[in-house]
Image: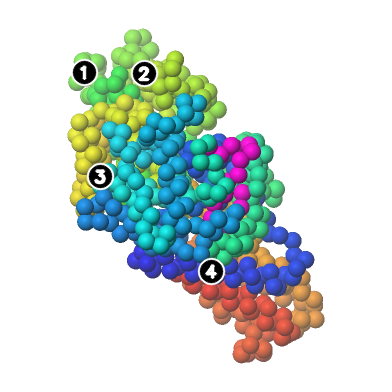
């Protein structure tokens, strides 16, 4: 199956390259460059793949710098596929060596050849910034995501990288077997930059530095707080992208960002505001894609060190999750039923996740000696107790300005008041919240009791979520979870290569966390929407919410523009009516594609649109709307290229 996916992607990219060539020939030399403007809430915090650990940075980096493997965004399961690798690697019997063949004929944007030497140089540079050998100067910070490349005891996952044979094979020698290694190579921190243009012992300067990779777009400039600009790499190994100029326009205000798309100022946004979805649905020039659930989990963290398991269980059963989703989120979310989101391997949402059950919550409180004489079916006693002498008081920390998290304060105060618990407003700025989460003096995690947080995996493997958020050695264990069985199973799952055995371990972990440990109150995952100008097609929405603009094309509008600009005499009659009808038919094709109905789109192109202009190319001339042979040839070439592209997606 993997090799089939590889062929599909390669063919898709080659077809897109052909589309670009065809459209250039048809448009002529005076055609303006194709521009796409992506509206984002933030600019990159970092340009260096060996330092960046936020989505705004990786969105930019991943257009420019490639990894050996990447996720197949055309696959709902986001299976890894080779990118700079020419095929999947091979494991040694002991699981300690992973040997990867590399693509030949690939060049960096500065003309430097891509090879095994470049791969080794990049991973050696990453090791330097991880300060494994202690040579990193104290004024240079250690890469923030070093824990992703370390075992819990601090041992590096990768022992060394070796060049094999002809400089187009590389071998990763591991210190011990690491099951999710292939997934780790998909992470942007494993990106390959040009050794000739990248500083070896300093991070790339965000304001003045240059980011040089092998990707489809060449980095041009970052005007801090305004925009990031890139242009097409004409020598890209899979063919030049159709988009000539790519701009990331920074619009922090959500309302203004959404409005900019509605006004046609920008072309694309991720996660449009829930309150404005209907505006996008109704807009004639905007495509709104419902891509299902995303992979970002949201939850109410509870300080496991300060709040015992009985309190955590009672809180978990006291929250009105239905109200949270239907009222606070407008129904545009689904309840989270595991720490592992659907779409990530071994996610199991079949366990007994807590739901609103005040009777059970109150019975748990009584098991701790609280309200033992109270009627568990009568709110009055419990609410009066909370108002006069609460059984417990917990602060709720969140970042002010986040409407949902502010609304959750009110919901928690109401819900937990019904089991005799007072919730105190502890809202603050995002930096102040982060200082507490990451134990940055003079702040510390024990200042947090209840807190709302979201988490998106760095790469698609359950260990990247489970170990990050529940290992007692992880810097991201914000809830300070420390369960011996979970710790044991997490360690085993990292070294267990057999998929069936790993599944059993992750089932055990999920069930224990959900039904016995209650480390969090499980929140929700949003429905994943993307909104963009209908003049573009080819964007693949995905659970990881990644943006990858290489496959994006405005070819359908180009076909339509081409037809609309044709002189009247090339039509058999009624030129204006024929142009309008062509436009309507092409819009139908776009809608089919956006709904994933590729076969239906192909049939529409083959049997409805193309026959209107193929009389001189073997078709029936009596069906032609366009009668000029030269125009027929050019238009059919464009349509055939589109059909070829769609056939690769089936």
Which contiguous range is marked in magenta?
A: 203-219
Q: Nearer the viewer, mark 3 or mark 1?
A: 3
Between discs 2 and 1, the one toward the N terminus? 1
Residue ranking furthest to the top: 388
Which is nearer the eye, 317 or 256?
256
Find disc 1 in the rendering and name its residue: 368
Q: Position of residue 20 (x, y in %)?
A: 63, 67
Q: Nearer the viewer, mark 2 or mark 1?
A: 2
Secondary structure beneath disc 4?
A: helix
3D distance between C-alphas at marks 3 and 1: 45 Å
The residue that label 2 is drawn on is 446
Vertical arrangement, residue 342 with respect to residue 153, above or below: below
- At a point 61% along the width and 69% down the height, the residue shown is 19
Q: Quadrant of residue 313?
A: top left
**Can residue 156 be found in the magenta stretch?**
no
Q: Position of residue 402 (x, y in %)?
A: 52, 30
Residue 399 position within the rendered picture, expressed as x and y whole percent measured from the top left: 50, 26
| Residue 176 numbered mark, or none | 3
x 28%, y 49%: residue: 179
Q: Is residue 215 magenta?
A: yes
Label 1's element? Answer: loop
Foreground mark, 4 or 1?
4
């Amino acid at each position: 199956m993997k090799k089939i996916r590889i062929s599909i992607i390669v063919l898709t990219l080659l077809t897109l390259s052909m589309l670009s060539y065809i459209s250039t020939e048809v448009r002529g030399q005076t055609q303006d460059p194709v521009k796409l403007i992506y509206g984002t809430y933030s600019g990159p915090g970092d340009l260096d793949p060996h330092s960046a650990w936020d989505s705004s940075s990786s969105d930019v980096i991943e257009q420019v710098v490639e990894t050996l493997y990447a996720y197949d965004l055309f696959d709902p399961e986001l299976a890894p596929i080779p990118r700079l690798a020419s095929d999947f690697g091979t494991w040694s019997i002991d699981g300690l060596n992973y040997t990867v063949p590399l693509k030949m004929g690939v060049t960096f944007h500065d003309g430097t050849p891509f090879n095994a030497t470049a791969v080794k140089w990049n991973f050696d540079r990453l090791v330097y910034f991880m300060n494994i050998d202690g040579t990193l100067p104290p004024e240079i910070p250690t890469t923030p995501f070093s824990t992703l490349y370390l075992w819990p005891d601090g041992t590096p996952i990768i022992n060394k990288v070796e060049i094999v044979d002809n400089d187009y094979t590389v071998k990763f020698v591991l210190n011990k077997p690491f099951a999710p290694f292939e997934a780790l190579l998909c992470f942007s921190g494993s990106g390959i930059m040009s050794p000739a243009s990248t500083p070896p012992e300093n991070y790339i300067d965000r304001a003045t530095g240059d980011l040089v990779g092998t990707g489809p777009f060449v980095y041009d400039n970052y005007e801090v707080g305004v925009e990031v600009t890139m242009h097409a790499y004409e020598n890209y190994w899979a063919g030049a992208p159709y988009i000539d100029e790519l701009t990331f326009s920074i619009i922090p205000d959500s309302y203004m960002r959404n409005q900019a798309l509605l006004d046609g100022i920008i072309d694309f946004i991720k996660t449009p505001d829930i309150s404005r979805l209907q505006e996008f649905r109704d807009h004639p020039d905007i495509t709104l894609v419902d891509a299902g659930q995303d992979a970002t989990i949201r939850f109410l963290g509870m300080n496991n060190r300060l709040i015992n398991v009985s309190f955590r269980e009672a809180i978990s059963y006291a929250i009105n999750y239905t109200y949270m989703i239907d009222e606070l989120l407008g129904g545009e979310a689904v309840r989270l039923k595991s720490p592992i989101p659907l779409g990530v391997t071994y996610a199991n949402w079949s366990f007994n996740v807590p739901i609103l059950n005040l009777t059970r919550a109150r019975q748990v409180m009584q098991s701790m000696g609280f309200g033992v004489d109270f009627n568990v079916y009568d709110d009055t006693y419990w609410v009066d107790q909370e108002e006069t002498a609460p059984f417990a008081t917990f602060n709720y920390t969140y970042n002010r300005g986040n409407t949902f998290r502010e609304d959750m304060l009110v919901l928690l105060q109401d819900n937990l008041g019904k089991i005799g618990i007072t919730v105190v407003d502890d809202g603050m700025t995002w930096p102040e919240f982060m200082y507490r989460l990451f134990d940055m003096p003079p702040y510390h995690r024990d200042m947090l009791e209840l807190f709302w947080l979201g988490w998106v995996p760095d790469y698609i493997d359950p260990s990247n979520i489970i170990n990050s958020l529940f290992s007692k050695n992880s810097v991201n264990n914000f809830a300070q979870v420390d369960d011996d069985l979970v710790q044991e199973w997490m360690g085993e799952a990292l070294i267990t290569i057999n998929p069936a055995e790993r599944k059993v371990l992750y089932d055990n972990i999920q069930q224990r966390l959900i039904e016995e440990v209650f480390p969090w109150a499980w929140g929700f995952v949003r429905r994943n929407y993307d909104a963009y100008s209908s003049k573009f097609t080819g964007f693949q929405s995905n659970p990881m919410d990644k943006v990858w603009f290489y496959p994006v094309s405005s070819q359908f509008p180009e076909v339509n523009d081409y037809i609309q600009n044709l002189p009247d005499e090339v039509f058999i009659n009624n030129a204006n009516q024929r142009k309008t009808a062509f436009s309507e038919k092409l819009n139908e094709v776009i809608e089919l594609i956006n709904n994933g109905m590729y076969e239906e789109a192909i049939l529409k192109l083959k049997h409805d649109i193309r026959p209107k202009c193929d009389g001189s190319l073997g078709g029936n001339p009596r069906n032609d709307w366009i009668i000029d042979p030269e125009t027929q040839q050019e238009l059919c070439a464009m349509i055939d290229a589109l059909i070829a592209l769609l056939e690769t997606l089936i």
